[in-house]
């Protein structure tokens, strides 16, 4: 028994005609007749009396018609709900620093959209100087950014991932043998840092305690890593940068004392009023919460 066979029975009972059912359901009349014959054989009895020009339900048909009608109605309701669910998707506009790879945020977004089929996430990558303005202007609903950039109380901030500043050095650099390094050990070390407008640069300056570090230049992460690989310099970067740039010639040395930066998902109180935004933030919070024993 198939859903189509049940639909044919209901339609024939309502129209009193095999040909009218064929026209209504866009199928040939011989095909309708065959489907009904197959179903009658499966059920062990005729569903319709065909003795007169007007087709009528048999006693078995009269017995089964209410059940079949209920099934067709429920199937129609299922399809209506499915269409409403898939055609009225909500969109969460997400602005993020270019850090999604190193903090596994891309994987989280994919899982969120899989579990929330009626919500799509529209992603834009921005630098810090543009991201906050975008959030304030309402151009995005949610931002993924470093927590320390936001004043307490002005935004809704939910911490996701903790990261630490580390020294990236070439494996042949004498500092590569250290289990940790202190700021004073880096005074003469040639360094490359992130651009001055980034919070990571400010974190580095704070870690170096106001001294005059030997900064060769400031650049994007890809350029910094390639210079460290060549042995031209070392770098201060967030430790989880290694998640993306897994270079066998680069070693990470922890910095003491620790310099911590937290990645957070942030929205305004206005954006938090949207249910899709609340669902998205709740999902990310759960996704990045360590399980028991971790």
Image (cartoon, rainbow, N blue to C red):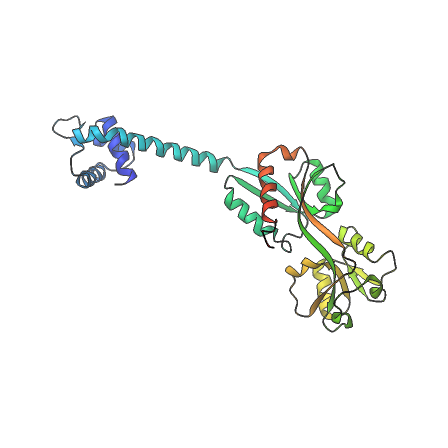
**Looking at the image, which is closer to me, 285 or 94?**
285
**Looking at the image, which is closer to me, 280 or 201?**
280
Q: 187 left or right of 49? A: right
Is residue 38 depicted above or below 293 in this figure?
A: above
Give how far across and how far down residue 271 sits, in percent.
65, 35
Give how far across and how far down residue 72 sits, in percent.
32, 32
Q: Quadrant of the C terminus?
A: bottom right
Which residue is located at x 28 percent, y 40 percent? 2
Give how far across and how far down residue 275 sits, in percent.
58, 34
Q: Quadrant of the N terminus?
A: top left
Residue 222 visible in the picture:
yes
Which residue is located at x 24 percent, y 30 percent? 65
Give how far across and how far down residue 144 sits, in percent.
67, 46
Q: Residue furthest right?
A: 211
Q: Residue furthest left?
A: 51
Is residue 247 depicted above or below 39 in this figure?
A: below
How many numbered marks are there? 0
Q: Quadrant of residue 225?
A: bottom right
Which residue is located at x 59 percent, y 43 percent? 122
Q: Quadrant of residue 82?
A: top left
Residue 244 visible in the picture:
no
């Amino acid at each position: 028994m198939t859903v189509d066979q049940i639909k044919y029975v209901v339609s024939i009972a309502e129209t009193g005609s095999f040909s009218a059912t064929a026209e209504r359901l866009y199928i040939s009349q011989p095909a309708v007749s065959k489907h009904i014959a197959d179903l009658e054989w499966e059920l062990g009895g005729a569903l319709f009396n065909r003795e007169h020009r007007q087709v009528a339900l048999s006693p078995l048909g009269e017995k089964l018609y209410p059940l079949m009608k209920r099934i067709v109605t429920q199937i129609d309701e299922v399809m209506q709900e499915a269409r409403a669910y898939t055609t009225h998707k909500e969109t969460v506009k997400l602005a993020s620093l270019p850090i999604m790879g190193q903090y596994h945020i891309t994987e989280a977004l994919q899982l969120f959209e899989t579990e929330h089929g009626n919500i799509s996430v529209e992603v834009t990558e921005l630098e810090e100087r543009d991201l906050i303005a975008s959030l304030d202007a309402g151009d995005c609903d949610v931002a993924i950014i470093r927590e320390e950039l936001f004043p307490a109380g002005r935004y809704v901030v939910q911490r996701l991932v903790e990261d630490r500043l580390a020294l990236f050095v070439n494996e042949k650099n004498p500092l590569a043998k250290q289990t940790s390094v202190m700021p004073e050990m880096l005074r003469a070390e040639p360094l490359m840092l992130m651009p001055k407008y980034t919070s990571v640069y400010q974190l580095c300056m704070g870690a170096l305690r106001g001294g005059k570090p030997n900064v060769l230049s400031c650049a994007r992460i890809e350029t910094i890593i390639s210079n460290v690989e060549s042995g031209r310099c070392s770098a201060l970067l967030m430790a989880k940068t290694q998640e993306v740039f897994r270079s066998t010639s680069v070693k990470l040395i922890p910095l003491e004392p620790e310099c911590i930066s937290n990645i957070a998902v942030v929205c305004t109180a206005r954006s938090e009023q949207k249910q899709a935004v609340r669902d998205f933030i709740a999902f990310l919070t759960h996704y990045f919460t360590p399980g028991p024993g971790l």
